[in-house]
Image: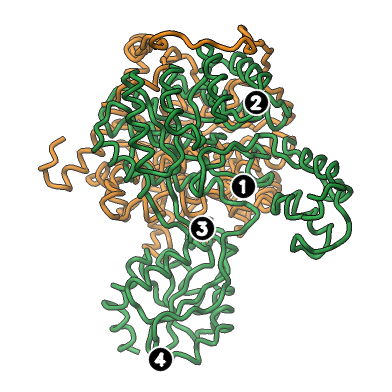
Chain colours: A green, B orange
Amino acid sequence: MPAKTISPIEVYKFLPKTNCKECGEPNCMAFAVKLVNREIELVKCTPLLKDEYKDAYKQLWEMLKPPVKEVEIGVGDKRVKIGGKYVIHRHELTYFNPTAIAIDISDDMSEEEILKRIKKTQEFSFTYIGTTLKLNMLALRSVSNDKSKFKEMVTYVANNTDLPLILCSFNPTIIEAGLRVIGDKKPLIYAATLDNWREFLELASIYKCPLAVFVPNDLKMLGSLTKTLMDNGLSDLVLDPGTIPKGGLSSTLNSFTALRWKAISEGDVVFGFPIMGTPITAWTCMDGDVNLKAWWEACIANMLIIRYADLLIMHSLDGWSLLPVTILRQNIYNDPRKPVSVEPGLRVFGNPNEYSPVFMTTNFALTFYTVKSDIEVGKVDCYLLVVNSEGIAVECAVAGRKITPESIAEELLKSEVDKMVKHRILVIPGKAARLAGAIEDATKLRWKVVVGPMDSSEIPKFVINEWKRIIQSV
Amino acid sequence: MKKKEVEKNFYNEISSKLLENLMKFGEIELEDVVIEAERLAIRFPQILPSGARRVIPALIPKKITEIEFTYPKMEWVGKIREVKIGATKSDGGTRGKSIIIGGETTPPFYTFSQPVSHPPVIAFDIFDMKVSLPKAVRTHFEDVMEDPAEWAKRCVNKYNAEAINLHLVSTDPLIKDSPPSEAAKTVEKVLQAVDVPITVGGSGDALKDMEVFKKVAEVAAGERIMINSLVKDMDLSKIAPIIKNYGHVVVAFTPMDLDLARELNRKLFEYLDKDRIVMDTNTGALGYGLEYGFTVMERARLAALKGDEELQQPLLSGSTNAWGARESWLKMDPEWEPRELRGPLWEFTTGLAMMLAGADYIMMMHPASIQTLKDIINYLTSGQITHDLDISNWVSAKIK
């Protein structure tokens, strides 16, 4: 199907075949396998960079480049890469470069308000399975259509952040005013339209900045304009087919889906660019109070994250709406080739003694880290038995028989925790309550099972209120 | 909204107001499409460059090179089977309306290729006993949670539920172990209280569920209810023929594993007609395994469309699982509040993702998340409403 699949053999043909190990792999074939899985970069093969391999390098680069171009915005550590997609569905390989999220700032805002929005955008942070969820960019809009006002805002923002920026106006003189300030910081210029494209083509060429192409709800003209810009030397483009709320969502979704199919399954280079969406339109053309607008903005953003958006511009800075959006982005971009699991086995927390509780959980990384953090925050001294559920959370693992009374009993006996504690009580998650009796049976009644709290945040309370009583009654 | 109010009331109000707004928008759309379209079509004048136009180098062409555009060609050979849930009088039941799910010939919502055959159905979850529910959900059902019939009525009368999922959790040997006869009575009551199609779920204990389903199938004879669910640990030769005899539909549940899903379907095909089987490949909550459920479902659907006949059943998602994610209900630091909005958005997002992966029947719980997903389905399938909403000047629009 759509994914351009290349066999390692095809790639191997062009490699030096010296097995020099400079790339860190045992031999050239292993390097070829990693290359086709996009797990290693071509430049790691240092011999390839030599003049004698110039043609082979070029061949390989062409073979391996993604059908959706990778476009860089900004400079320095915070620069953002968007696009670089190889497949339509995540299971066909994986999605690279998670959807960048830009928060808007407009030149009708006071400096105080602008600073507040910069800070909130920069400080947005949520720790989730060992990674930190972040917002990535700022989109600067010219509302006043006054170039000195725009310039003032751009200067102020640039002085207060190193996040990559998007300059938003359809007026070339406004954009140029912004580019004079930050043209060397590789902002994304938003946007060339059917009316202004000649001026925008010139600006993007002069300042060597990536350019967005905005033609709402008309893929033929979006393609035509993109082709024209390409023919005139631009290669870093971002396509905006329009994000239309309400009834327009139908054509919006169709556009995003069709663009990605054209690029990947048909290899159409005109559409082989990152796609951007603007859920902020929920604020500019919908009725209702602020919560309703933020609600719809998040709903639209989530739809577009699932359907191929590489960059989104949003307005709300509410945590309640951005948290589900950023978590969804993490989920969808999570590499499906890597199971999110930790090693099964026994873990020790604090300084447990012979009367400390033995808890149980599954080896789904998120479940494990959540339980771990709750135990650590609550300063609980205990043992934690991590049972292999093939990386599935407790509730699903029980329903799907990914953990069974037998597998729990086996892990329990293997752990030799019975040499560390005098009691024989296993505290299982409330969500695995159903298995209680069967686990006891599976240990041949050597262990007693107590059903613990439904959520691990209750573990510290459970230890204080109930464990004491349980252990005393033994 | 007055910030001086007690926090609790404040957040409750946000949640209900959101819901009220959502309901209102939904209604307006249905009643008077044209007015809504005009009212929302805010057109800004195209802003022209101020001052003199730049002098553009002669190198730049004057005209755009026009290209042809054709939507990507789709070559799907498979078709998802249609399954009807709920029987009306003419079919020997008492439902006011049946629902049909399935029938797709393309991936979900590829409407540029084919219109949606049957829009996904969003069904409300209710329980046969008072269960612990997140506050954001409880607020809307607190007074009816002791009575499943009233609970079902609330969903249908107030929130326009298209279908009800009654979960017989009290039959769980580890909860109340209530007998199949009692469960059957509850099913009868709910069938009498509302006339939408219903799905009846057990406790998840395979042996007990078989007993419960036998009795339930009998009392609901002819109603074409959906039994949720049959699993591979059951003796299917005992339960499936009974369900067939009484004319119902089943959900085949497998734990995120397509090989198991095929295997279970193969076994069920021996006893049941293919238009009476719906697949549940399992759903993980947003943040807690959503991606696995999403991808298994997406793969199931794509395989079916590519011709895999063992996977061509409509798909069901228990998106209510979203509430299993602690971030959907837990009181968090102030920057993530209010949870009264975070929670429903969590459930909506889970349901939306599963719908875009291929789910045809989606179980959910919060009226606001359900209303929003229904609105989205409406927008995606009608394609006509407010099509002229002009977004072209979002760049310079003032946001208040």
Q: Are marks 2 and 3 in contact (CB under 8 Å)?
A: no
Q: Are marks 4 and 3 on the same chain?
A: yes
Q: Where residue B174 sits: x, y (%)?
A: 41, 66
Choose the circle earlier in sequence order: 2 or 4.
2
For label 3, count other residues whose C-alpha is less than 10 Å away and answer few (under 14), some (14-19) or many (20+).
Answer: many
Number of marks present in the image shown? 4
Choose the circle earlier in sequence order: 4 or 3.
4
What residue would you read off at disc 2? A271
Asked whether the viewer can see residue B212, the reply is: yes
For label 4, count other residues whose C-alpha is less than 10 Å away and answer few (under 14), some (14-19) or many (20+).
Answer: few
Q: Is residue A284 above or below residue A328?
A: above
Image mark for residue A354? 4
Disc 1 to disc 3, how far (Cα)?
14 Å
Q: Which residue is found at the position 54% from the left and 80% from the top?
A: A412
Q: Nearer the viewer, mark 1 or mark 3?
A: 1
Q: Where residue B369 sits: x, y (%)?
A: 37, 37
Q: Are marks 4 and 3 in contact (CB under 8 Å)?
A: no
Task: Check the picture and name the quadrant holding the N terminus of chain B.
Answer: top left
Q: Which residue is found at the position 36% from the left and 34% from the top?
A: A155
Q: Is residue A168 above or below residue A136?
A: above
Secondary element at tag 2: helix
Q: Are marks 2 and 3 on the same chain?
A: yes
What residue would you read off at disc 3? A396
Secondary element at tag 4: loop
Disc 4 to disc 1, how far (Cα)?
44 Å
